[in-house]
Amino acid sequence: MTTPCDIHKIIRLRAAAVALAVAAAVGTTARGQSVGEQAPFTPMGLGGAAPGSTQSRLGPAPGTDAGPFAAQPGQDQPLMGAGGATSVPRVPASISTPEANPTAGTRSMAAPTPLPVPPAQLYGSLSMPEEDEAAAVPGGMTLDQAIELMIRENLDLKSKALEIPQARADVLTASLLANPIFFADAQMVPYGNYTKERPGGQTQYDVNISHPVDFSFKRTARKAYASQVVRVVEAQYQDAVRLAMQNVHTAFVDVLSARQLARYAKASVEGFDRLIRATELLYERDISSRADVSQVKSQQQIAIVGLEDAEENLRRSKRTLGMLLNIPPEQAETLEFDGVIEDRGPEPPPTEELVRMALEFRPDVIAFRLGIKAAEAGYGLARANRYQDAYVLYQPYTFQNNAPIGLKSAYSWALGVTVPMPLYNRNQGNIERARLNINQSRIDLAAIERRVETEVVQAAREYQITRDIVKRIRTEIIPASEQSKNDRFVLFQNSQVNVVSYLDAQRVHNDNVKAYLDTAIRHRRSMLNLDTVVGRRLLP
């Protein structure tokens, strides 16, 4: 015969099997893509969270553990006495108690999807423009304005922000008092009537109320745990904002690089106009051939194609940034952005100071520190769950019907208490699990601190190296290449070299300009990446 305990065991086993199947499915999906493979860009995606589910959009809260709050032997079960006893409710205590798990299950969702860094497209040649890149853009949106707009309008962040009031709602759930149990019954009801030949006790009618007494302070422990989880979730949301800012950084630099690439391509087209005029002049003087003129014009068409592609790449970059800012694509294409690629700001503090700042201010590190306190609160809750509630019973109405024996019926009341005998610790495994979770959370904190330190050191080194390379290319390589190209042009005008020789010099210069632009963009990204890994805005 299947007992209620067997039924509960079967339900728990089936729930565990479903959980394992879901975990296996998620793991398979996560392993389906290699580390080096770049998926199509989906800004701040939903990850594995099912639409409409109760899973957190912010990821697992550090320091939390489902163990102490799952179904466990120490939770309150019906303690009222044997069947047939007088003045005893026969209903499960679970109907009167609030939900034992104040966090509504394990929260799981991956971090926001980093924005991939697209390679700069190049069709045709490039030339350094004469005007200053830092020229003001009337009404252009700055990076600070873009970040402010993203925090206010980004739909994914709006969704994640709702995790905080949901966590506060868990505090409310955890603070709920258990309801008393109302119970009414009729006992000693005969089949027919009692007689002298078939005597029986009086028919009795009872009304009683059983009120649980939380003498181990489980409710206080639940509130403490849920309150700590709120602080962890708030830190996780701040980290989600930090990662979203990194995506805006990447998209903003992509716009600046695409704009600069378009400016370089436009300067190249204008340079070919001068070369065509010089070649045609030499052709009119019978110094160069028609083939030379045709070759220069074909190179100009390639440069025009490169300009058109660069302009479309700029519009594409604006649409990507507009998606992060919740701006329609048509409106995003018309936006102008005020910023420069060149590093014109002050140098960052020393690496040791950057590491200290990151460990102090990065919200993911703060979340793991708060997670240790949450794990300690979970340990306190597991210990509080060692004992079941006591029940105080008040029976204000008992009616004994003595009419069948010709006597006056009687009314009475009763008072009782049901207390579990703490002979056994019914929660030993969950207490040990919660204690180990504290140590595990401390190890996790040490691991993320080491990771943050490494990230800061690598970001600082990247900043230093790219800054030196950009400076060397701009001050040494580009001027020499530019001078060589101009000298070849003078020689071409004087008929000392042919147009092919000049185009070769132009090609070498084009490669140097492309190398400078790529390195300048790489350095600009290193600046913003340094802000991200430190968790503070240090560089413009």
Image (cartoon, rainbow, N blue to C red):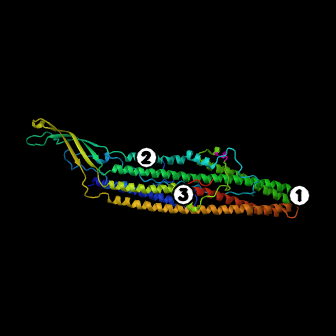
Element under label 1? Answer: helix
Based on the picture, tell me whether residue 227 belongs to the magenta stretch.
Answer: no
Q: Quadrant of the image for the N terminus? A: bottom left
Q: Give the image quarter of residue 39.
A: bottom right
Q: Where residue 312 sits in the image (x, y, percent)? A: 69, 51
Q: Amino acid at mark 3?
A: Met
Q: Give the image quarter of residue 12.
A: bottom left
Element under label 3? Answer: helix
Q: Identify the residue position indicated by label 1 in the image.
A: 283
Extent of the magenta region: 332-336
Label 3 packing within 10 angstroms: few (<14), some (14-19), many (20+): some
Frontmost residue, 328 versus 496: 496
Q: CA distance from mark 3 to mark 2?
A: 30 Å
Q: Main secondary structure of the magenta part?
A: loop
Relative placement, left or right, of 88 versus 72 is left
Report if residue 55 is visible in the image: no
- The dot on residue 168 is 2
Report if residue 59 is visible in the image: yes
Frontmost residue, 462 versus 508: 462
Q: Amino acid at mark 2?
A: Arg
Q: Amino acid at mark 1?
A: Tyr
Q: Where residue 481 sits in the image (x, y, percent)? A: 77, 63
Q: Identify the residue position indicated by label 3 in the image.
A: 357
Write the residue at 59% across / 58% down.
530
Q: Looking at the image, how many numbered discs can be counted on the residues? A: 3
Element under label 2? Answer: helix
